[in-house]
Amino acid sequence: MTDSERPAGGAAHPRLVVLAGPTAVGKGTVAGYVRRHHPEVWLSVSATTRPPRPGEQDGVHYHFVSDADFERMRAEGDLLEWAVVHGRAKYGTPRRPVERVLAQRRPALLEIDLQGARQVRAAMPEALFVFLAPPSWDDLVDRLVGRGTETEEERAVRLRTARTELAAATEFDVTIVNDDVARAAEELVSLLLEPSSTRRTDIP
């Protein structure tokens, strides 16, 4: 999508950037680098019904909520987007913090899944949508197996989902290849902060 194809009234360089990509590609790791090294960028904290993984902190990496609380948030319109991921846990972006930060014209980053990104595009088409891709399929498989946080059955489900997610890269404005976390994160930050940044790159 070029600037001339963006919806009328949308900013040439939106302050809201949406980061999505296949499972195990390292979205959380890249977002974590941005959180540590670029405090000027506001990162949305998603709500999820899945249990915390080792090292994850409530309110920092996710808001860990019960299924009942998540359903209440959804029913009351408190979620900008939400999805059931891998047929198991629910994830969603609390709406009010995003709206508050955008009203302040601060650079904001949403790290969400593909389903959520599509919902945000429908609600906020002026945002910039960035797809985080692995260097190769084998690299993605190695990352998923290496992190050791899923059972063999869960890995199989995630890999099937990942193939579908990779095919959606063309829906996004920009693709960043996560061959190095620091480099990928800095490229992402440049899209948030520098109006002249390139709007489209391709998966090798």
Image: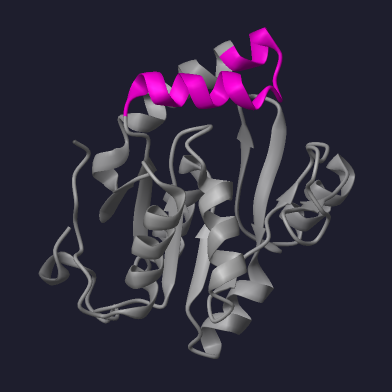
Placement of the N terminus among the 4 image quadrants? bottom left
Residue drawn at x 55%, y 91% as measured from the top left: 104
Q: What span is in magenta? A: 136-155
Residue drawn at x 52%, y 27% as measured from the top left: 143
Q: Is 125 left or right of 105, judged from the image as shown?
A: left
For the question of whether residue 42 can be seen, the reply is yes
Q: Is 182 left or right of 147, judged from the image as shown?
A: left
Quadrant in the rendering for residue 166: top left
Q: Is 137 left or right of 82, judged from the image as shown?
A: left
Placement of the C terminus among the 4 image quadrants? top left
Quadrant in the rendering for residue 101: bottom right
In the rendered image, the vertical position of residue 126 relative to residue 157, given as above or below: below
User: Residue 197 appears at what percent x and percent y?
Assistant: 23, 71
Please identify the dominant SS of the magenta region. Answer: helix
User: Residue 155 appears at what percent x and percent y?
Assistant: 60, 16
Please tell me which residue lies in front, 76 or 28.
28
Residue drawn at x 34%, y 62% as measured from the top left: 187
- Total tally of numbered discs in the picture: 0
User: Residue 60 appears at what percent x and percent y?
Assistant: 75, 61
In the rendered image, the vertical position of residue 109 relative to residue 32, given as above or below: below
Please tell me which residue lies in front, 49 or 187.
187
